[in-house]
Image (cartoon, grey):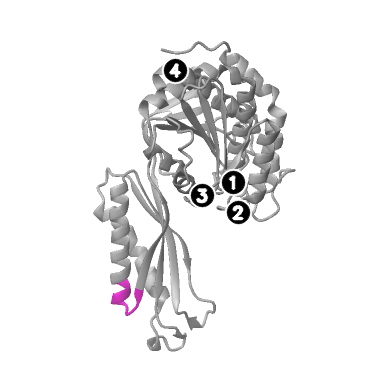
Amino acid sequence: MSQTLTITAEQVLASAERIREDIVRDRRTLHAAPEVGTDLPNTVACVKKRLLEMGYQPRELAGGVVAEITGTETGRCLLLRADMDALRVTEQTGLDFASANGCMHACGHDMHAAMLLGAAKLLREYQGELNGTVKLVFQPDEEGFTGAKAMLSSGVLKDPAPQAGFALHVNSGTPSGLVLCGRGTFMAGCTLFRITVNGVGCHGAMPEKGVDPLNIASHIYLSLQEIISREIGAKTPAVVTIGRMTGGEAPNIIPQTAVLEGTIRSFDRDLSAQIFTRIGEIAQCTAQAFRGTAEVTELASAPPLRNDAALTNRMADLAGALFGEKLVYRLDEGGMGSEDFASYTYDLPCVYLLIGAGTKQENPAFGEPMHNERVVFNEDILPRGAALHTWCALNWLADKGNA
C-alpha cells in the first residue's frame, strides 16, 4: 500500500535542473579545497553553512554532518549518505577550479556531497510530500575505511532510526547518467595491512655483518602471490596487492627495516580473515628463514558491500521512472573495488548505486581511472544525482509497506 505522490518524476528532474548552478557551485567550492581523512574542518563548515541556509539544523557527528527533514511524522526514516573526503593526489586536470593544495577529489566525493546538498534543497521544496523523515549524512574518511564505522559507533542510526539506507557514487568511464544497480554482494571487502620487516643494518660492503630486510621483503612479496594461485579456488574471487614497498635511505647501506603495505580483497569476510592469517604466517616464516623478523598489522578494513535485493530492485525501478529504462543497468555481479558504506549494509537494508560520470567517447577529458590525477567528472550528472536521491526518498517513504 502506498501514498500517492502529487508530483511526478518529470517535475522532480526539472526542479533539479533549475538548481543546477547551485549544485555545480557547491561542487566546485569543495573540489578546490579538498581535505583528507577524518578531520575535514573546512568541508564540514561548508556543508553546515549550506544546510543552515536551507533551513536545516545540522549537527556534527564523528567528523561528519547529519541533518533531518520530516514531512508527515510516520516513524519511517530513510538515510541518504554522501562521503566528503579526498585523496593525497596532486591534481593535474587543468580545471579552472582545480585543487592546488596537494590533495584532490579524485574519487568524486565532492560530487557526492554536492548532489546530496542539492537533494536537501529539493526535499525542502517537496517537504509536504514526505511521508516520514529523511536523514542526510555527510561522512568523512571513506577512503581510510574509518568514517562509516565511526559514525555508526557514534549513533548515526539513532534518533531517528532509519529503516533503510541509500548511497550514490559517480563512476568514471561509464556513460554519463547510466545508473548501475548491482544486487547482492556488489563490492568486495578490503583489508589494508602493513608488514614491517626487521633486520640488522650494516655497511653495503659487508652484508654478512647484517640481516638484509630488503631481501626478506622481496621474498615475502613473491611468496604472497602464491596465496591466490595455490591456496584459493580458481572460481573464488580474491586479490592480494602490495602497493607500497619502502626501506633504506642510501645506496651503500643495508637498512634496519623495510615496510610493505597492501590490500586483501574478496567477497567473503571469512576468506579475507583466512588470507590475512596466511600473510602473517608467510611473512614471519620467511623472515625467520633469512634471520630476521616480521610483524603484520591490519591498518583498516571494510566488509563486502551487500545490496538488499528487494531495495535495489525498487530503487532501480525508480531510477527508470526518472531517467528512462535505457539509462538503468541491473546486474548481479560486482567488482573488486571497495567502499566503506558496506558497514551500513550489515545494520539495515541498503542500496548503493553507481552513476556514470562520462567516457572518452563523450569528451576526451572524461574517462580517466578513478583516483587518477587527471580524472574529470561530467558535471551534467550533478542535477540527476540530486534528483535521484530526492525521487527515491519521496517514493520509499510513500510506500507504507516500509513501516
Q: Position of residue 11 (x, y in %)?
A: 62, 15
Q: Is residue 330 left or right of residue 51?
A: left
Residue type (three-letter) at the residue carrying disc 1? Ala
Q: Secondary structure at mark 4?
A: loop
In which image quadrant can residue 260 be found?
Answer: bottom left
Inspect this view and state whether residue 386 appears.
yes
Q: Residue 48 or 322: which is nearer the viewer?
A: 48
Q: Are marks 3 and 2 in contact (CB under 8 Å)?
A: no
Determine the CA span between mark 4 and mark 2: 43 Å
Q: Does the magenta run of residues contain 289?
A: yes
Position of 72 relative to 163 (above/below): above
Coordinates of residue 70 in the picture (x, y in percent) = 56, 25
Q: Earlier in the sequence, mark 3 or mark 1?
A: 1
Kindly state the secondary structure of the residue where label 1 is placed: loop
| Label 2 sits on residue | 89
Give the number of the mark in front: 3 or 2. 3
Asked which secondary structure carries label 2, the reply is: loop
**Distance from label 3 to label 4 (Cα)?**
34 Å
Q: Amino acid at mark 4?
A: Asp
**Comparing labels 3 and 4, the label whose residue is closer to the camera:** 4
Residue matched to label 4 = 399
Q: Which residue is mark 1?
A: 106
Q: Is residue 247 located in the magenta-colored stretch of the structure?
A: no
- Mark 1–mark 4 Cα distance, whole angstroms, equals 37 Å
Q: Residues within 10 Å of mark 3 (few under 14, many from 20)?
A: many
Vertical arrangement, residue 324 with respect to residue 67, above or below: above
- Name the residue rendered at 60%, 44% in the picture: 375
